[in-house]
């Protein structure tokens, strides 16, 4: 049974989009952490083992600057670390909902950069505001933070900014994406205003949300923050591939050339005249179709419309 589950997970990781891969990585780390914790607690007479808390803190981001200097990797590892089920569950639900929309609208290659860079920015905000509150009131202790919330909020906000009028069916009613994102951000603002020690985690959420907004803002002005990130990861992937014993350089892919560009342009027109239908309206219709039937249900014409929209961002 376990081998079958493992084989399925490997298959989904290889064939799935970046959202699926991020969810699988988060779930895998959650399982590993909790299995290790179960063994540690069992060795301590099935009671809470201080070693488990030390393990969690080791991979979390530290707000104490002295500890942070000794554990700088926490800036990255914290965004994949969750050991409580409901913490993981809601982060992955939001990542799945909004990640699909962001991937369809912004291209799947931008999902990982938004996730990682948004998580990093959220962690930096956590450190800054934790120290600010501590200096203003020493009763606010310095601690550590973990979880994918900042990274997920970056993707959530990016989806809300790029497709604000996208309609989502909830259990009892249907509403627009911008209202759901607004409510999520509003609750984080309430969390900050509570001025409890846990409020510093909400600064990480809001920092991630700000990055998601800023990413789309720059993208619409021709600045793609994902380009240097993807170039860096491509170089790492290329280097590791060369180390494999059976490595073969990739063959250049043939380019597809359309002989009749005018005919292709005409196929992208909807039933109504192009003057009466804006590109945003066409995209909204296509997004509704994706929501109901999946992206594989799109025709060539509809895919061209989505590509035109992405290129204009």
Image (cartoon, rainbow, N blue to C red):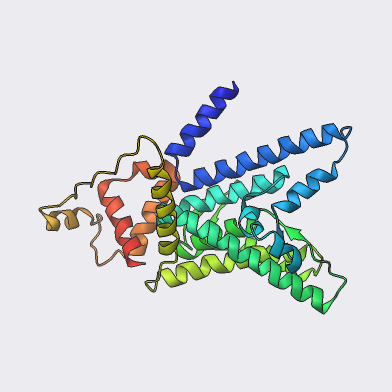
Query: Could you tell me which quadrant the C terminus lies in?
Result: bottom left
Query: Could you tell me which quadrant the N terminus lies in?
Result: top right
Q: Which of the 4 image quarters holds residue 274?
A: bottom left
Frontmost residue, 193 versus 14: 14
Q: Which residue appears at 47% of the width and 57% of the height?
A: 166
Q: Which of the 4 image quarters holds residue 43?
A: top right
Residue 95 horizontal/vertical position (percent): 56, 50
Frontmost residue, 192 versus 174: 192
Q: Is residue 270 shown left or right of residue 207?
A: left
Looking at this rendering, what residue extends furthest in the left direction?
259
Q: Which residue appears at 26% of the width and 47% of the height?
A: 300
Q: Which residue appears at 81% of the width and 73% of the height?
A: 134
Q: Is residue 199 shown left or right of residue 13?
A: right
Q: Which residue appears at 59% of the width and 62% of the height?
A: 120
Frontmost residue, 52 versus 203: 52
Q: Is residue 197 shown left or right of residue 103?
A: right
Residue 85 horizontal/vertical position (percent): 71, 42
Looking at this rendering, what residue extends furthest in the bottom direction?
136
Residue 113 horizontal/vertical position (percent): 48, 58
Residue 106 seen in this snapshot = no
Count of residue discs: 0
């Amino acid at each position: 049974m376990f081998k079958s589950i493992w084989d399925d997970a490997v298959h989904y990781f290889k064939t799935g989009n970046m959202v699926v891969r991020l969810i699988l990585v988060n779930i895998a780390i959650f399982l590993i952490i909790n299995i290790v914790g179960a063994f540690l607690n069992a060795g301590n007479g099935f009671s809470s083992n201080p070693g488990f808390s030390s393990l969690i803190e080791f991979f979390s981001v530290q707000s104490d600057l002295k500890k942070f200097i000794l554990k700088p990797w926490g800036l990255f590892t914290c965004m994949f670390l969750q050991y409580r089920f409901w913490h993981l569950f809601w982060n992955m639900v939001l990542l799945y909902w909004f990640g699909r929309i962001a991937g369809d609208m912004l291209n799947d290659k931008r999902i990982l950069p938004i996730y990682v860079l948004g998580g990093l920015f959220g962690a930096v905000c956590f450190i800054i505001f934790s120290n600010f509150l501590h200096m203003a009131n020493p009763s606010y202790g310095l601690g550590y933070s973990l979880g994918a919330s900042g990274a997920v909020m970056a993707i959530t906000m990016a989806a809300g900014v790029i497709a604000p009028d996208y309609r989502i069916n909830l259990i009892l009613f249907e509403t627009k994406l911008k209202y759901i994102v607004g409510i999520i951000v509003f609750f984080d603002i309430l969390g900050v205003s509570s001025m409890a020690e846990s409020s510093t985690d909400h600064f990480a959420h809001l920092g991630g949300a700000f990055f998601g907004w800023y990413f789309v803002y720059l993208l619409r002005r021709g600045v793609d923050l994902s380009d240097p990130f993807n170039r860096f990861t491509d170089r790492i992937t290329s280097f590791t591939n060369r180390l494999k014993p059976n490595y073969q350089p990739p063959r250049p892919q043939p380019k597809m050339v359309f002989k009749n560009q005018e005919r292709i342009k005409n196929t992208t027109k909807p039933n109504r005249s192009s003057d009466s239908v804006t590109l945003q309206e066409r995209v909204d219709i296509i997004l509704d179709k994706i929501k109901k039937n999946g992206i594989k249900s799109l025709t060539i014409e509809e895919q061209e419309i989505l590509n035109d929209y992405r290129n204009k961002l």
